[in-house]
Amino acid sequence: MKSFHFELIHRSKRSRARVGRIHTPHGIIDTPNFVAVGTNGTVKALDNSMLHDIGLQLMFCNTYHLLLQPGTETVRQAGGLHQFIHRKLPIITDSGGFQVFSLAYGGVADELKSRGTKKQGGCVLKITEEGVLFRSYRDGSKVLLTPESSIKAQKDLGADIIIPFDELPPYHIAPEALKKSLARTHRWEQRSLEAHLKNPQQQAMYAVIHGGVDPELRQASCSFLTGLPFDGFAIGGSMGKTKDEMHTLLSHTLPLLPQEKPNHLLGIGDLPSIDRSIPLGIDTFDSSYPTRAARHGILLTSQGGLNITKSEYAKNFSPIEKDCGCPACAKFTLAYIHHLFKARELTSMSLATIHNLYFMVQLMQKYREDIMEDKV
């Protein structure tokens, strides 16, 4: 049996929601599932042994940042990313394209919100058919990122799932420019796949479906990329200004993907979007939202977000959420965590992050149970 394969367990009778298992060299990923973002090989404020204890099955690391610091050659010499960061469970890495093109067109947060309007400039020096030339934000040195060098970097890192190099055009782009961008992305993805297949290393590669908010281009992207031997499919690029627009786009795109292979929604993982996307058949989601919210004192609960910095929690000696099995709820009270935030103790962020990630793990478990019972 292949080291990487997708096993479909159940499809809901009520929707396209499905329960499955993604088998990888470092273990199984139950789907649907949430993927935490550990940009530099760690989720901010936590060590990787805690992620293991929480039960986070898949972690997302950023090739762009690891390429610049400490360098992917250093990680390779350390025995690969799993060894370097002491993680036994599966890892997915991106190509670096998302960060590079966010430098060209606007910040990552702006692009996720479809506000990327900035013209090429700043750290990005040149975008050509070969790839993207940019300056390192760390030391100003010039770096050329191409499909081949992105895959070489991801081979050094040794993640279970890797992503081909792609272009991330902004939401506000002329139709003709979007067509040219998509054609180049397809050429880059094909080059990435060819480089990967020369040395698979038991890694799986997910294609990235692009096309902006144009349904015809999304269909063309699905048609081209599903004709190539990718192991799974990620949906990327701008998906609209509103959740309704994204829902319409995903409703159109997902039926065009092979049902026997896993799919992933890139960069989207807020609770309303997950709730609307699971019935469409999305398998995995990555987002920094739960961990970023935690560092700002927003704790996720079944009743919604709780702002622990508010004075109403100063004398509340209950856990964050009753019956929550996370280490933060098992040992500490709202009053204590409130005090830590007010005192600006770093432990406040650690406890909040532990709780929010545990909440996401349990939430996805509940979704899987509900799909198995055809409730979703």
Image (cartoon, rainbow, N blue to C red):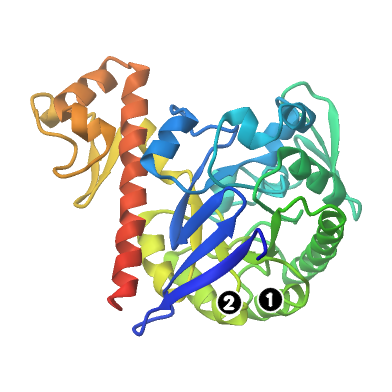
Q: Which mark is residue 273?
A: none
Quadrant that contains the C terminus: bottom left
Q: Quadrant of residue 195?
A: bottom right
Q: Look at 17% across and 42% down and name the residue there.
A: 321
Q: Earlier in the sequence, mark 2 or mark 1?
A: 1
Instruction: From the viewer's perspective, tell me whether residue 183 is left or right of residue 32.
Output: right
The residue under label 2 is which amino acid type? Thr
Identify the residue under disc 2.
Answer: 253
Q: Look at 86% across and 49% down and name the residue there.
A: 148
Residue 349 location (% of width, % of height): 36, 27
Instruction: Give the answer, above or below, for where 97 lies relative to 276.
Output: above
Circle 1 residues within 10 Å: few <14, some 14–19, many ≥20: many
Quadrant that contains the N terminus: bottom right
How far apart are the two marked residues, 2 and 1, measured between alpha carbons? Answer: 8 Å
Question: Looking at the image, do the residues carrying marks 2 and 1 touch, with CB atoms under 8 Å apart?
Answer: yes
Identify the residue under disc 1.
Answer: 222
Residue 166 location (% of width, % of height): 75, 56
Residue 83 location (% of width, % of height): 63, 32
Instruction: From the viewer's perspective, tell me whether residue 11 is left or right of residue 299.
Output: right
Residue 115 location (% of width, % of height): 56, 53
Q: Is residue 349 something that shows in the picture?
A: yes
Report helix, strand or loop for mark 2: helix
The residue under label 1 is which amino acid type? Cys
Q: Quadrant of residue 340?
A: top left
Q: Front-most of 241 and 49?
A: 49
Q: Is residue 292 something that shows in the picture?
A: no
Q: Quadrant of residue 364?
A: bottom left
Report helix, strand or loop for mark 1: helix
Name the residue furthest front: 1
Q: Look at 49% across and 34% down and name the residue there.
A: 43
